[in-house]
Amino acid sequence: MTLRRIMKQSGLPPEVLLDLGLELLDIASRKLSPSPIKRQAVGLGAARWRNVSPEERSKALSLAAQARWAKHRRATKEEGGPNRK
């Protein structure tokens, strides 16, 4: 849509619409870009695996996933949830 069309439909002046557009862009850019702390954490996480072979990395991640699911299954059984096979 063009600015003129939006002005016509909303009845708002162009300054208000442009301000609103800039505000929406600002909000979207904050949601799309991670905060510096999260960026650093991701970088540190990647650095941890820098000197690890793909086979070792795969094995470690597989063990971590299995441990996570085992923990989930234990918690479900303790709560008396349905037994799934």
Image (cartoon, grey):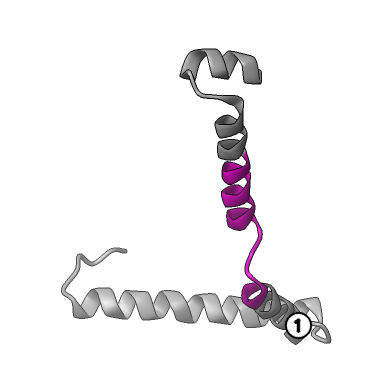
Magenta stretch: residue 31 in it? yes
Left or right: residue 71 versus residue 80 is: right
The residue depicted at 60 percent of the width and 57 percent of the height is: 30
Point out the stretch of residues depicted in magenta.
22-38
Question: Residue 49's x, y, as percent?
Answer: 76, 82
Left or right: residue 85 versus residue 35 is: left
Q: Which residue is mark 1?
A: 49
Q: Secondary structure at mark 1?
A: loop
Quadrant into which the N terminus falls: top right
Question: Residue 38's x, y, as percent?
Answer: 62, 74
Towards the viewer: 85 or 54: 54
The residue depicted at 68 percent of the width and 73 percent of the height is: 39
Q: Is residue 5 above or below residue 54?
A: above
In this rendering, does residue 61 appear at all? yes
Question: Residue 12's x, y, as percent?
Answer: 50, 23
Q: Is residue 14 above or below residue 50?
A: above
